[in-house]
Image: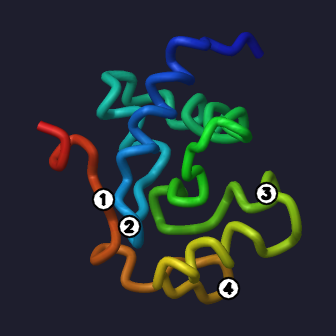
Amino acid sequence: MDSNPNFFEKAHEVAKLIPYGRVTSYGAIATYLGAARSARMVGWAMNNSSGKDVPAHRVVNRKGLLTGKHHFDGTNLMQQLLESEGIVVVENQIQDFEKVFWDPSKELL
């Protein structure tokens, strides 16, 4: 798959704006960037973000599942990072997802 460095950079910039203790979804970032059908590309961008100071652990799927956790070092690093920010995760599912969800389309006007 060809990566789009410009799209990846834009996705990284949005992810950097997610507040501590909040999460968003791949699709919410894609929609904010005007590419609503590109949630998977946002996932690739998060996977490509190591070493770039991007809080990729705060980006989950639209149901609040930690679908990207296998891309983090260690078996539970993504969950541990989220829990260290006060987010409750049970069986790879963020609890009270609606309360901790951050929508860039609404927050970044």
Dot 3 or dot 2, earlier in sequence: 2
Residue beneath the point at 61% across and 89% down? 90
List x then y, in percent, for residue 33.
Answer: 34, 26
- Location of mark 2 (residue): 22
- Location of mark 4 (residue): 91
Which amino acid, mark 1?
Trp
Q: Secondary structure at mark 2?
A: loop
How many C-alpha atoms fall within 10 Å of the one at disc 3: few (<14), some, or many (≥20)?
A: some
Dot 1 or dot 2, earlier in sequence: 2
User: Tags 1 and 2 in contact by the CB under 8 Å rule?
Assistant: yes
- Location of mark 3 (residue): 72
Q: Report the mark closest to the observer, 4 or 1.
A: 1
Q: Secondary structure at mark 4?
A: loop
How many C-alpha atoms fall within 10 Å of the one at disc 1: few (<14), some, or many (≥20)?
A: many
Circle on res. 32? none
Dot 4 or dot 2, earlier in sequence: 2
- In 3D space, how far apart are the residues under numbered discs 4 and 1 (Cα atoms)? 21 Å
Q: Quadrant of residue 91?
A: bottom right
- In 3D space, how far apart are the residues under numbered discs 3 and 2 (Cα atoms)? 18 Å
Q: Residue furthest right?
A: 74
Would residue 74 be found to the left or right of residue 1 on screen?
right
Which colour style is shown? rainbow
Q: Report the mark closest to the observer, 4 or 3.
A: 3
- In 3D space, how far apart are the residues under numbered discs 1 and 3 (Cα atoms)? 22 Å
Which amino acid, mark 3?
Phe
List x then y, in percent, for residue 56.
Answer: 59, 50
Q: Quadrant of residue 104?
A: top left
- In 3D space, how far apart are the residues under numbered discs 4 and 3 (Cα atoms)? 16 Å
Q: Nearer the viewer, residue 70 or 82?
A: 82
